[in-house]
Amino acid sequence: MNLLDADAIELLGSIIAFVFTLIVLLYAFGDNPLFRLAIHIFIGVAAGYAGGVAWHAVIQPHLVQPLLNLGNSQTSFTELSLRLLLVALMLTKISPRIATLGNPATAYLVGIGAATAIGGAIQGTILPFTSGSGGIFQVEAIQSVLSGATPGGIVAVFELVLVDGTVILIGTIATLIYFNFGARSLPNQTPERNRIIASIAWLGQVFIAITFGVLFAGVYIASLNAMIERLFFLWNLLTTFLLGSG
Amino acid sequence: MADINCPMCGESNPPELEVCQHCQARLKPLVPEDNEFPLDLPEEELPDWLSSLREDELPEIQPRPDDETLDWMASTDAASDPTLNQSSEIPEDDPEWLSNLRAAEPEIQLPQKDYDTSPPISNQDQDDPDWLLELRQRQEQEGGSSETGKPAEDTGDFMERIQDLQDNEVEAAGETSDQPEEAVLASLDAEDQPAEPSEDTSRDWLAGLSDEAQDLFQESAQSAEESPDWLAELGDSASETIQEPAQPAEESPDWLGDLADSASETIQEPAQPAEESPEWLAELGDSTPETIQEPVQPGYEPFVEIQQPVAEDSISSLLEETPAETTEDTPDWLPQAESSAEKTVLGQVVARQEEIDALLEDQPKASQGVDAESPDLPKKPGFVDTGSLPSWLVDLKRSEPSIPSVTPQTPALVSEEDSSKFSFQSDETEIGLTPAELPSWLSEETLITEEADELIYEAEESEASPEITPEIAPADLPTWVETMRPDVQEISATDEDAQTGAQETAGPLSGLRGVLPAEPEIVRFTKPPLYSIKLDVTENQNVNAALFEELIASESETLTPKRQIEALSQRILRLAIASLLFLSVLVPVLTESTSVASPSAATIPPETQQFFSLVNEFTSEISVLIAFDYQPGLSGEMNTAAAAVIDHLLLKGAQIATISTSPTGPALAANSLATTQPSHDYITQKLYRNLGFIAGGTSALRNLADNPREAVPINVLEGEELRSVWDMPPLQEIHTLHDFSLITVITDDPNTARAWIEQVQPTLDGTPLTLIISAQAEPLVRPYFETSPKQVEGIVTGILGAASYELLTGRTNLARAQWDAFSMGLGITVIVILAGGFASLATSILSQRQPKRSEIQK
Amino acid sequence: MNLNLKAPISTIIAIGVGVFILSGYFIPLFPELRTSLLTTAMLLVGFALFMGVINLSLVHLDKIRQGSKTALYSFLLIISMFITFVTTILQGPDGFLPNWLFSNIQIPVETSLMAVLTVSLAFATVRLLTRRLNLFSIIFVFSAMLILLGSGPIFGFQIPFIGDTIRPYLSQILAGAGARGILLGIGLGTVATGLRILMGADRPFGG
């Protein structure tokens, strides 16, 4: 493929990208029939690319190539047979009538997924957050202030310990308690939580509202950046095309 | 002895039981088996009234010398029943008709066994009266044949009574029963075979009945429930016996049909009231003044219900009749018996009458219909088929008020309404028979009072009923029959009970009101109430049911999302916001403005500062694994955020290997690197290694952390040789992830960041893990940075982190170019949210206050 | 605990494999077997992704066959999917055409959709106080506003105290506390759910 063709193809691609971008951005002002067209084409491209990547990156190196290089492959025959069997069982999930045959393969995935999830949660989240190394009170920062490496003095220590650490501790506990929905059932009364628990849960709800507000702001910033990037793309393409043609 | 199967329910019962223990139906028929006369009792055991009846010799029933034989009798079986013998002589004072009957039936033998006198309307075996039971038992014990002499002795009284009955007006029962013979035959003999006796039974005095009456009698006789044995034997083939005591009432014997047919043809006396019935029967057992009710049916009135107690002697006189005498003495109004069978029938009738007399004597009450033409024959309860009856009988019955017809199924039943009106007492003696125990023709209204006599007499003079079919010639009733007819209407008018009470629908008392029931209530079977299977649903229930059905149906319906049409104000607001945002961002883009100041050092986040410091500490060539795990939609922010870091890494001489747990990761990596790092030849020459996509999420990361070479078995075509990517720089020294100098994960999803932290970081063993994340993931990722020891060494968050990093590196990149547009966009956003929020807040507050004011004003 | 004995084979597989992998987090035994099992899981997940693409194509082929209103769109989808898949298979994910399709169709459309989200989020924020006016919605909007105000200069002007004090405190301390609680809750829930699966109490695999 020569450069002209490559440039032409690049230009064509850019034009297509330009058109698709405009079609989708105009959806902000109202629905239009071209939008559905663009979306369906997008889904087709995305699905096709994902299927191709799955074949190239997973199926071919882990199943096809070992089968083709049965003698030289590092994969044993037993392991390969197991993979073939599970893949064949997974194939039955296409048809609802024989989908139950694929349950062992699904069970295999579920078992491994559960185990990795449990191990990671314990190892990566629960233990680090609940141990003394949780960093709530920023021990290193306090040590740094006390040693004089970080200016601030007692005020800084006070701030780090009482303000930040305590608030984080209270907020963490309150948020956890909020997700406890256990209530006592009283006769002729609607089940209600304990008053103390309900009060702490209310405080946890405040922390959750703040957290969700911060998350919302982050999503908005991300989408705003996407808008900025797209408008830059459009403008750059226009200028390149105009400058290039001109 | 074998158990007896109940004819009604089919259950097995011990042989000694009389009544079924399951359904209370009669097990042992009241009709004597083998058509034998049941009245074979020793003389000393006979009831007085029966004995008195038997004292008088019945005149012989001579066969009719002429051919005036009743058609119905002619149609009966010609073979006479040899068992029936009539040896009794007919008294001289017997009426001519009775004499003729006797002459026609010279050899009529009374049945030897007890016969069933249960009410003809009974569909099942009713409780037999005691007297009948006794009769049967005696009959069974003795096994002798009945005497025929006794009935003959009572013939005279019987005839006298018939004579009396002629003077009275008999109320027409008005019965339109479908079983003309049912009431009579059923009461006579429950075991009688209904169809057969009708063909055989004939009497001299009935020989003159019309053919039509005879035909009708035949037809209805087949459905008679019960017919007495002695009637069944009259003209039956004798070999056939009636063994069905509980047959439905519609099975009337044929002989009765013949009787009716012949009677309706030959005996036509329109002037005579239809209520006329033989006097002798009317005097049987009942002395209470009750009107005679005879069902009036067009075309067939074989029997006339009489309520007058029939004198025993008259009954006996009727019964005491030889076939020859009966033939000779057959009344003119009765057709001659056309065959000897008829004569035989007549003789049997006479003989039967003797038994009836004996039974009636013991019964306090009985309602029995008596055929006006054959007074000694039991009357079918409540049935009047004027089509086949003699005209005189028709007249008798038509003058009677209408009586409810007896149902075919239960012809012998006495309706409860009329049960109280039935009484069975003769003027002279209490016959002692309960209505259930009497023969069918006696169990009906046979109560004849003085008033009934008058009524019969008046009915006798009444006009003929127009219901008589033209084709049936009304018969000339003898005067004595007409006098026997009670005036049912007069009786009803005088009798308060008859006026107020329910009307009897069956038996000889049919049509009368205020009669006592023939059967005790406990044995009175009524048709079970029919409950409608139709569900009665009210309108309100229908509405609720429809509503409930609609609710259930809506649950299974798939809701199609309706296109929501925004209100115009909302559309305008949306357009305004979109326009403002696009314009605010487009202006800096178009102008490529960079006037907005970069973030200050004070605003640099510590995690970004630490990231920079970490990368800045690398002095030699480092191998960095960069994971591109973000979505293509956030490539704008991620590329902006990663550009400064990757640029810094490349400046530090890092050898980059890219990997992704997302299918679009490899393409994003190539696109991002090509877009953001065009100044680095390392990127443009594609010297970096793309490890591609690893599927499996956390399991893939765990596998990568344990054995990256096994997790990513990629072969790269280098020249013409296919080599493993792990054998190529910079990966030839990489065996575990710990061998990497730095691992940076570029992601927009906090879950992906958490997965890398949870699965990979514990195995890094000192290798720093850094994150380049989107602003939306910062709150959920930052806690991992604050742990001690830190699980994440550095974080660059969005455009702010990129701008801060660029500030630290001193190299402008995408963040700087987008900073002005970002600033304008943020400003417009804040203004829109503040303005719109306050406006919405004020609107909602005002709208809440307005309803309150309106409520206060009200 | 409900010992549902239906589908024992699947349950045995799930429990057996899961317990072995979980034990590897604490007892580093049989690393090769663990690697083999994890590699097989990667293969199955990749194959499941492949089957998902096939299923999507079957659904739209069915729509085309039935002649539904969106048959034209389904036809375009099938065509684009087929072209992309074939080119990716032939040239690999790093090939020219797959990259061309990805760069000029997928990235622009997805990024543009994210850009349109800006308008929707702003519009939703404006109407939030009208639809649901309570303390927590006010806290939510107020927190978002502070973060936005402190994330960058507003019309070129950096608001003092908000950007350097309020915003960091809000995002690092207050939101961080809530985030910690959420992360701990996620971790505890993950452990509980995973243990239920490994004990056989839950069988989401159709057993």
Image (cartoon, coloured by chain):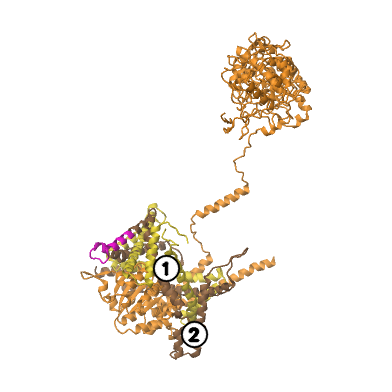
Chain colours: A brown, B orange, C yellow
Q: Magenta stretch mostly in which secondary structure?
A: helix
- Looking at the image, which residue is at 45% across and 87% down? A143
Are labels 2 and 1 assigned to the same chain?
A: no
Q: Nearer the viewer, residue B202 or B751?
A: B202
Q: Nearer the viewer, residue B443 or A129?
A: B443
Residue B784 to residue A15: above or below: below
Which circle marks residue B618 in the picture? none
Residue A225, magenta (yes or no): no
Residue A82, magenta (yes or no): yes
Identity, as a three-letter code, of the amino acid under mark 2: Leu
Identity, as a three-letter code, of the amino acid under mark 1: Leu
Q: Which residue is mark 1?
A: C113
Left or right position of C134 against A41: right
Q: Which residue is mark 2?
A: A160
Which quadrant of the figure has residue B158?
top right
Which span is picked out in magenta? A63-87
Q: Position of residue C53 (x, y in %)?
A: 36, 61
Left or right position of A40 against B852: left
Which quadrant of the figure has residue A244?
bottom left
Give the position of the C terminus of chain A as an image quadrant.
bottom left
Residue B609 to residue A105: above or below: below
